[in-house]
Amino acid sequence: MRIRHALARFAAAITLAAAGLLTLGVEVAEAQQPSAPTYDVYAIRYATVPNFRLSGLIAGANTSQRIDLAMMVWLLKGSDGRNVLVDAGFHRDNLIRRWHPRDYVLPSDAVARAGVKPEDITDLIVTHVHWDHLGGIDLFPNATIWIQREEFEHHLDSAGTVKDRMIDAPDAQILARLAREGRVRLIDGDAKEIIPGITVYTGGKHTYASQYAAVRSSVGTIVVASDNMYLYRNLAEHVPIAQTLDAASNLRAQARMVTLASDPRLIVPGHDPEVFVRFPKPGNGIALIR
Ligand SMILES: [Zn+2]
């Protein structure tokens, strides 16, 4: 009787130990998941375009109101050493002469202020083909360029010929050349996790197939909206961006961003100087979103 009791206790102990090992095994497997990296997300300002008409940003805004546009790129610094840039800014002389930006620095120099050399940018996500987002792609010599297939094919052909005037001719030439060199990856549509922890979405309709990115960070999911949401006001007042091919679809995209972000305050607009007020650190034109 006593022996049987001891045996039963021994069996119970073995079962417990096995369960413990099993739990340990699960934890090890989770820790080794390849999709685990998180990103620090920085808005980086490389220029200001002063006195821009607010009605060019907010549909229906008073035509006499003006705003100083923050010109930004967004750096996603991965815990796995990957350095992803969202958009590339602009740098050609004719654009600088035309727009008279204040406090202009090369977007690559602005990124260097955040501690990442241009050659260390591994990936560059182009949200859309406008000059102030695409024009700087040749400043980052080792980056793989990610753009929606529909955005690319709608605006240019493989020789770099412009098919829709939303893209500037020199930008089309450079993008086509990088594609011929095998540095461009075309994304097939909505809700694609193109890089572990970074998922892109379409439907913002700022351009034909503009995209935005949801990024896994240590504070939750951050949405880098780019021009699919110009200003915080678009979201707060439920107003579409002024430049859109489809206002209803733009509003739907903004509503979706709210469901994707861990908190609405983690949705980063494309040109709002307020970003650097809400996220003042580390400063000097760099805002850590958190
Ligand atoms: Zn734009």
Image (spheres, rainbow, N blue to C red):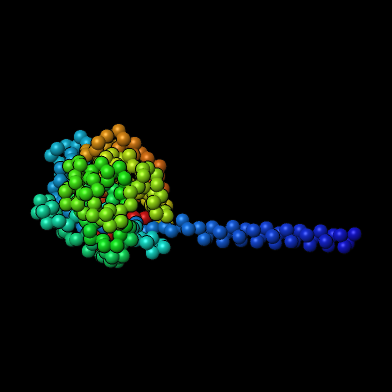
Task: Tell me if 224 is positioned left or right of 129 in this view.
Answer: right
Q: Residue drawn at (17%, 42%), measured in percent from left and top?
A: 165
Pick the residue in front: 237 or 169: 169
Instruction: Decide if residue 262 is on the left or right side of residue 246.
Output: right
Report the label total: 0
On-image quarter of the N terminus: bottom right
Which residue lies at the image location 28% right of the left edge and 51% below the top edge? Answer: 126
Which residue is at 40% across, 47% downward?
A: 192
One can see residue 53 in this view: yes
| Relative side of 61 to 278, left or right | left
Front residue (pair 94, 263): 94
Q: Would residue 64 appear left or right of 152 to someone viewing this image?
A: left
Q: Residue at x 20, y 34 (%)?
A: 60
Residue 77: image location, x then y, percent: 35, 60
Above or below, comparing residue 13 to residue 148 in the picture: below
Give residue 137's quadrant in the image: bottom left
Residue 92 or residue 266, whichever sits in front: 92
Q: Quadrant of residue 88?
A: bottom left
Residue 80, position as x, y percentages in the image: 41, 63
Image spot of residue 205 (x, y percent)? 28, 39
Q: Residue furthest right?
A: 1
Q: Is residue 265 visible?
A: no
Which of the pair 224/133 is nearer the observer? 133
Query: Outermost residue, left direction?
Result: 97
Q: Where is residue 162 in the image (x, y as percent from the top left)?
A: 19, 44
User: Which image quarter is the C terminus in?
Assistant: bottom left
